Image (spheres, coloured by chain):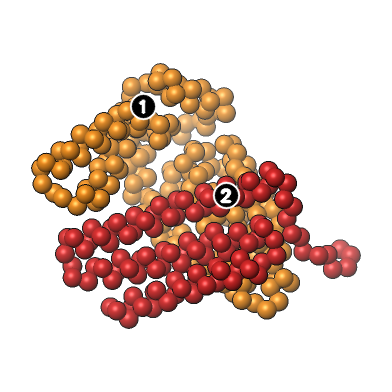
Chain colours: A red, B orange
Amino acid sequence: MNLVVIIILGLGLVFFAGGAVGILRFPDFYSRLHPAGKMDTLGSFLMLGALALYHLHPFTLDNVLVAIKIMLIVVFYFLASPTATHAIVDAGIRAGQSAWQKPKQGAGS
Amino acid sequence: MQKPPTPQERYQAEAQVISGQIRPVKRFYAFLFVFPTLMALWVVLSGRFDAFHLILGVISCALVSFLSGDLLFPHAPHPRQTFRLWWRFPLYVPWLLYQIFLANLHLLYLTFHPRMLQLIDPHMVRFRSTLKSEMALLTFANSITLTPGTITVRVSPDGDFVVHAIDRFSGEALPGEMEKRVARTFGED
């Protein structure tokens, strides 16, 4: 059981790290939002899910309630994160921020 | 299958909600939907199951869903559709999680790829969705944003989508299967 929790926590960390590196590496405002808005979501889902799983261990009512509360955090995160990402993108478009385009390689590409 | 409301009808419906002229039946449907949700939240968050706390919960949830239930869902669907939604939505979520996981792996691969700038090709995708209700459009838009490689830039109430895709691979998948599944979940297929 502990092993499973550790593996899931590690996976979540990998996604969080990927999100952080992605924010630094992608070329412009819009593509930076891709790792920022989504890999964080999956990372927090995995980590909070692992915590909820860990908390279930002595299977009592109190622990189940705590696990449900942790999963509620995930639910609200899943509602809020895309909405926030969308708001930021929309603000960028309204402010006239132009998107990074792939440089054209020769004619017709 | 009823006709989708025109923008003007939507506007009128919202104006009715704001001015409190909405039909009592609709209010009751909204109440049916909001009250169990709030009550479940109350029970989970309070964690006490004695009569005193439960009755407090019933009173406050009833008050809140009576006063503002129709603000949360101005176009509350018929109860039959609502119950359909209650058991269809949990079927949609695992599929979405699986897609999020797959697509995140793809984004992770892109992030750590040394020649990332040659692989990605950000572009805008425009398409028109066949979904009609607001909840379905909202779910679809949030699902698009959650699947990496694509962010919903703009949605109009009529279903016009503008989506920012990180590479060709992510952009091609739209609207595709996800829209079909959302449509099935909300009973619009």
State the residue at coordinates (68%, 43%).
A94
Q: Would you say the residues marked 2 and 1 are in contact, meaning their CB atoms lie under 8 Å apart? A: no
Q: Is residue A46 above or below residue B183?
A: below
Q: CA distance from mark 2 to mark 1?
A: 30 Å
- The x and y percentages for residue A58 are 18, 70
- The x and y percentages for residue B16 are 45, 21
Q: Nearer the viewer, mark 2 or mark 1?
A: 2
Q: Is residue B173 left or right of residue B10?
A: right
Q: As shown in the figure, which amino acid type bears the numbered disc 1?
A: Lys
- The x and y percentages for residue B133 are 49, 38
Chain at tag 1: B
Residue linked to disc 1: B26
Chain at tag 2: A
Residue sitting farthest toward the right: A107
Q: As shown in the figure, which amino acid type bears the numbered disc 2?
A: His
State the residue at coordinates (17%, 60%).
A61
Residue linked to disc 2: A86
Q: Is residue B76 left or right of residue B49?
A: right
Secondary structure beneath label 1: helix
Q: Decide which of B177, A39 is in the foreground and name it.
A: A39
Q: Is residue B156 above or below residue B6?
A: below
Is disc 2 in the same subunit as disc 1? no
Q: Residues within 10 Å of mark 1 (few under 14, many from 20)?
A: some
Disc marking residue A92? none
Secondary structure beneath label 2: helix
Q: Is residue B75 above or below residue A10?
A: above
Q: Is residue B96 visible?
A: yes
Q: Is residue B175 visible?
A: no
